[in-house]
Image: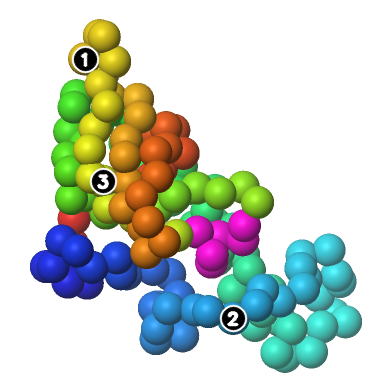
Amino acid sequence: MSDDPNELAALTPAHFLIGSSTLSVPDPDYDLVKRGSLDQYQQWQLLEQKFWKHWRTEYLQELQRDTKIAARNNALQPGKLVILIDDLLPVTRWPLARIVRLHPGKDGITRVVQLRTSRGELTRPVAKICALPPV
């Protein structure tokens, strides 16, 4: 969303759904409830939950696959914006980070990166990040 390499904001599905990033608490999972027993708001929440599930299971997997290919080709670069995959958090809470430094192995393939988040720096394996495509 910005050309500033120090900004940790990116375009997310929430921008398309509600017009801005979401900071709300996740709603109950309506996927197991019969659709006929849901009111109109709950049906909207179900549709939103299906969108997030699709985004997480298909779009992010595609980005992650591209990240693994990019790691083999050394296409990951410092300054690139990534999403940190955290299985303990809902998708809406996955933090954004920028790559600070690459840590290639003896074979020259980058498998670990050092990242800068809003809470400081950390090191993560390439398998636990999804590089966002350039806008």
76 on left or right of 118: left
Which residue is identified by label 3? 99
Q: Is residue 62 visible?
A: no
Q: Earlier in the sequence, mark 3 or mark 2?
A: 2
Tell me where the magenta segment starts and ends, as one range.
89-94
Looking at marks 1 and 3 on the same chain, the residue that comes earlier in the sequence is marked by 3
Q: Residue at x 44, y 50 (%)?
A: 84
Task: Residue type at mark 3: give it.
Answer: Ile
Question: Residue 116, image x and y in percent?
Answer: 31, 53
Q: CA distance from mark 3 to mark 2?
A: 27 Å
Q: CA distance from mark 1 to mark 3?
A: 17 Å
- Residue ID for mark 1: 108
Render colour scheme: rainbow
Image quadrant in which you'd find residue 104:
top left
User: SS for tag 2?
Assistant: loop
Q: Inspect the magenta stretch and tell me whether residue 68 lies in it.
A: no
- Decide: few, some or many residues near mark 2? Use Cα within 10 Å; few <14, some 14-19, many ≥20: few
Residue at the extreme top: 107
Task: Give the quadrant of the C terminus.
Answer: bottom left
Q: Amino acid at mark 2?
A: Ser
Mark 1: secondary structure: loop
Mark 1, other Cα within 10 Å: few <14 / some 14–19 / many ≥20:
few
Q: Are marks 1 and 2 in contact (CB under 8 Å)?
A: no
Residue 51, image x, y percentages = 55, 66
In the rendered structure, find residue 12 and report the number of the disc placed on it. none
Q: Residues within 10 Å of mark 3 (few under 14, many from 20)?
A: many
Q: Residue furthest left?
A: 3
Question: Picture quarter containing residue 125?
Answer: top left
